[in-house]
Image (cartoon, helix red, strand yellow):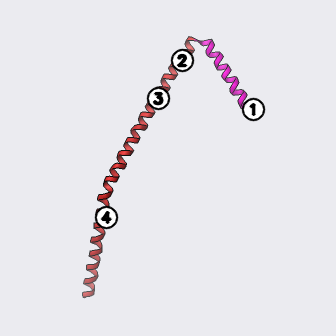
Amino acid sequence: MSNKGSSHDTTDKVAKTAHEVVDTVAERAAPAEERVRESAAKAAERAREGAEYARARTHDMTERVCDYVKENPLMALGIAFAAGTVVSSILRRH
């Protein structure tokens, strides 16, 4: 019977030690997890800002091109024709 009690004591000690190790690891991991979350949030914010900047620039450039075409329709047609000719020539060679 003493063997049974000793085995139970050993199991309790191992379980207690395991719990302490898990608690220690959790305490040390919490600040690292917080830093990772902060870094991810900053990266997501930078990505949103970059996407917004790209949308704004695209919109601005589209407006500028539309304005140019409205003000210079024949020139725009000539540029489009020349660009089409160059692209067609390049595609035929490959």
Place of residue 16 in the rendered image (x, y in percent of width and height, measured from the top left): 27, 71
Residue assigned mark 1: 93
Q: Amino acid at mark 2?
A: Cys
Q: Amino acid at mark 4?
A: Val
Task: Indicate whether 88 appears above or below 11.
Answer: above
Mark 3, other Cα within 10 Å: few <14 / some 14–19 / many ≥20? few
Residue drawn at x 43%, y 31% as measured from the top left: 52
Q: Earlier in the sequence, mark 4 or mark 2?
A: 4
* Mark-to-mark CA distance, 4 and 3: 47 Å
Residue drawn at x 44%, y 34% as measured from the top left: 50
Place of residue 25 in the rendered image (x, y in percent of width and height, measured from the top left): 32, 61
Identify the disc placed on residue 22: 4
Picture quadrant where residue 13 is located: bottom left
Place of residue 26 in the rendered image (x, y in percent of width and height, measured from the top left): 31, 59
Residue assigned mark 3: 55
Please provide the residue range marked out in magenta: 72-93
Q: Earlier in the sequence, mark 3 or mark 1?
A: 3
Q: Secondary structure at mark 3?
A: helix
